[in-house]
Amino acid sequence: MLVLVVDSSTPAVTAALVEVSADGVVSRAHRCTVDARAHGELLAPQVDAVLADADARPRDLAAIVAGLGPGPFTGLRVGLVTAATMGQVLGIPTYGVCSLDAIGYPAASGEPVLAASDARRKELYWAVYDGAGERVVGPEVSTPVVAAARARELGATIAVGDGAHRYAEILDLPVRVEPRYPDATVLALLAAERIRAGAPSERLTPLYLRRPDAVVATGRKPVLP
């Protein structure tokens, strides 16, 4: 089954095509551009590009997998709206996966690992995974100091993700070079059981974890003294 994967929870805007079979998940085409300010401009062309790279058409897709975040409001909703709209138009199921899982799961090495992405405002989105890659805490949003304390309590020995690179000194854990951003093939792998079973389409509920920066004004300021 040919599956489209999209993630826009981090500065890395990702689109990929993977083939899901009884034997596993294989990448067919992949595009990723790191630009925190251009999610809306980049994702749709990248979807078109991976389809062209694999000599496929939208009607060839059997399902869509989307990273649910956590992530900043504006960027994250680009991927989820794209996935939900395509799923509805094509009449195929959509499945969501926590984006941090696609960072923490592949980094599992027998000991707990902290996966972190930049949440801006000098904070991190983070989760802790056990040695088998199962999420045991999170996702949460907090300062790096709080994330580091919780990770140490849970025995984390390494950190991974763009947020870990940004706040490496505060976290005070060895930081792995990769994965820095959610891995599209891993997102598909974590949804593969649902895809193979033909599970019902899921509502793609974003993991914002906090309110957006922009809020509706509650009143009008007087313009006259």
Image (tube, grey):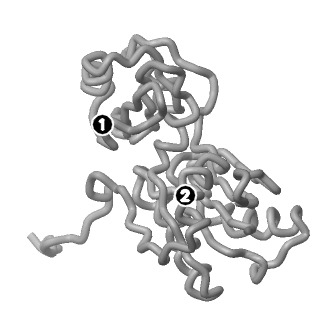
Query: What residue would you read off at disc 2?
Result: 191
Label 1 CA crowd tier, 10 Å (few <14, some 14–19, many 20+): some
Label 2 CA crowd tier, 10 Å (few <14, some 14–19, many 20+): some
Tell me the quarter of the picture where residue 92 sits.
Answer: bottom right
Q: Secondary structure at mark 2?
A: helix
Q: Which mark is residue 171?
A: none
Instruction: From the viewer's side, name the closer residue of 25 and 169.
Output: 25
Position of the C terminus, as image quadrant, is: bottom left
Q: Is residue 141 above or below residue 97?
A: above
Q: Position of residue 45 (x, y in %)?
A: 75, 67
Q: Position of residue 74 (x, y in %)?
A: 45, 61
Instruction: From the viewer's side, name the closer residue of 105 and 176.
Output: 105
Distance of mark 1 from mark 2, alpha carbons? 20 Å
Which residue appears at 70% of the width and 48% of the height? 33
**Residue sitting farthest toward the front:** 22
Amino acid found under the numbered disc labelled 2: Ala
Q: Position of residue 156 (x, y in %)?
A: 38, 18
Q: Position of residue 183 (x, y in %)?
A: 63, 44
**Residue sitting farthest toward the left:** 225
Instruction: From the viewer's side, name the closer residue of 28 and 192.
Output: 192
Tell how many labels: 2
Amino acid found under the numbered disc labelled 1: Val
Query: What residue would you read off at disc 1?
Result: 137
Position of the N terminus, as image quadrant, is: bottom right
- Mark 1 and mark 2 lie on one chain; the one further toward the N terminus is 1
Which residue appears at 44% of the width and 69% of the height? 204
Q: Secondary structure at mark 1?
A: strand
Q: Is residue 139 above or below residue 214?
A: above
Q: Is residue 179 left or right of residue 133?
A: right
Tag in front: 1 or 2? 2
